Amino acid sequence: MFKVRTYNQISVKGLDRFPRAHYEVGSDISHPDGILLRSHKLHDEVLPESVVCVARAGAGVNNIPLQDYSHRGIVVFNTPGANANAVKELVLAGLLLGSRGVLTGIEYVQSLTHMNDAAAMSKLLEAEKKRFAGRELYGSTLGVVGLGAIGSMVAEMALALGMKVVGYDPALSVEAAWRLPNRVERMENLHSLLARADYITLHVPALEATRGLINQDVLKSVKPGARLLNFARDAIVDSAAVVESLDADQGLGMYICDFPEPRLLEREDVIAMPHIGASTAEAEENCAVMAADQLMEFLQHGNIKNSVNFPAVNMPRAEGCCRITFSNDNVSGVLGNVLSIFTANNVNVIDMMNKSRGDVAYNILDVETPPSDTIIDQLRQVEHVINVRVLGAE
């Protein structure tokens, strides 16, 4: 029986993925094998030693102490792409709101409560509507920074609207490149993208390398009057630099974001939403289902997909064999030392896979016969081995 502790309100569709015959799931589990959460912050949580994996039902993992968990061999998952359509649709709303005087026009109409004559109101609005005129998206240029699951969908949407699209992503994966429409023009650097784009939309994760990505220096290259959209993470934008650019004669024309803060309020050139990018019933369901499936695949079979701190590993199970997994510091000799223990104890390894990512390595081994507790203890004593799991035969 596997135990999974939940934090936050997890979609029922995700919770229903866990077979009750094999999983105990709830918010009050005392010694869980896995954690399933959304935005709950784990930095100050004392995690039980029993925990081997954490799944975030969402893309960002800044609420999880990744470095500490990696050192403890705890695999952390996220759900990239599960909320992509929800964010894409809100980006569309941001583009439209940033190009037309929709919000200011609505506010003006709502201020006319003193008028009782419909004909007079119509005449007034006909005279005043020029105040809320804007421009069309068709034919303008959208710059997409980050061309992953969401960025590629936004690019495709913009092309369908008749926009020109330029993109920048220094870490573009082969998989993401295949998803990307061929009409997207790749830019060599961020400065050149900002100089070309009428609208800039950000879709990169919050990493040390992307913190303050949009800063005072970068914004010097922005096309005068451009609209900047941030529905990714607040940490990638220096809001003080954005305000400075908005106030400049040749700077940004508007900032549309999902991350309000005091300096952004009461400005007509800022549209700030209350972090609702993934707040749709469909996105929450998709994220919960993906997170639950990834937890189960790891807990039952040791396979890893969409981890942010461990390598992707997927090995079919050899029929009738016992499966053992272990993680270790990514240094030479560890796997050899582990295999020598199996050899010395006449344990036959049928199949195996070894992958590494940064400072950590991960291994799956299918052995012909279940090793004794003594052998498992020997494996745990191998220098640089972080943890060992015995999954048994399927």
Image: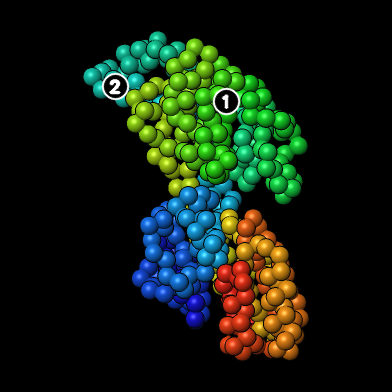
Q: Is residue 275 left or right of residue 370?
A: left
Label disc, if present, on residue 111 of the rendered structure: 2
> Label 2 vs label 1: CA separation?
39 Å
Q: Is residue 325 left or right of residue 214?
A: right
Dot 1 crowding, Cα within 10 Å, few <14, some 14–19, many 20+: some
- Front position in the image: 253 or 127: 253
Q: Give how far across and how far down residue 359 sits, in percent.
A: 62, 58
Can residue 47 be spotted in the picture? yes
Dot 2 crowding, Cα within 10 Å, few <14, some 14–19, many 20+: few
Q: Dot 1: what SS?
A: helix
Q: Give how far across and how far down residue 201 sits, in percent.
A: 57, 33
Q: Which residue is mark 1?
A: 218
Q: Amino acid at mark 1?
A: Val
- Front position in the image: 192 or 347: 347
- Give the image quarter of residue 76: bottom right
Residue furthest front in the image: 383
Q: Give how far across and how far down residue 294 sits, in percent.
A: 57, 65
Residue 216, above or below 358: above
Q: Residue at x 65, y 79 (%)?
A: 323
Q: Residue at x 47, y 31 (%)?
A: 238
Q: Residue at x 64, y 29 (%)?
A: 190
Q: Residue at x 72, y 78 (%)?
A: 339
Q: Amino acid at mark 2?
A: Ser
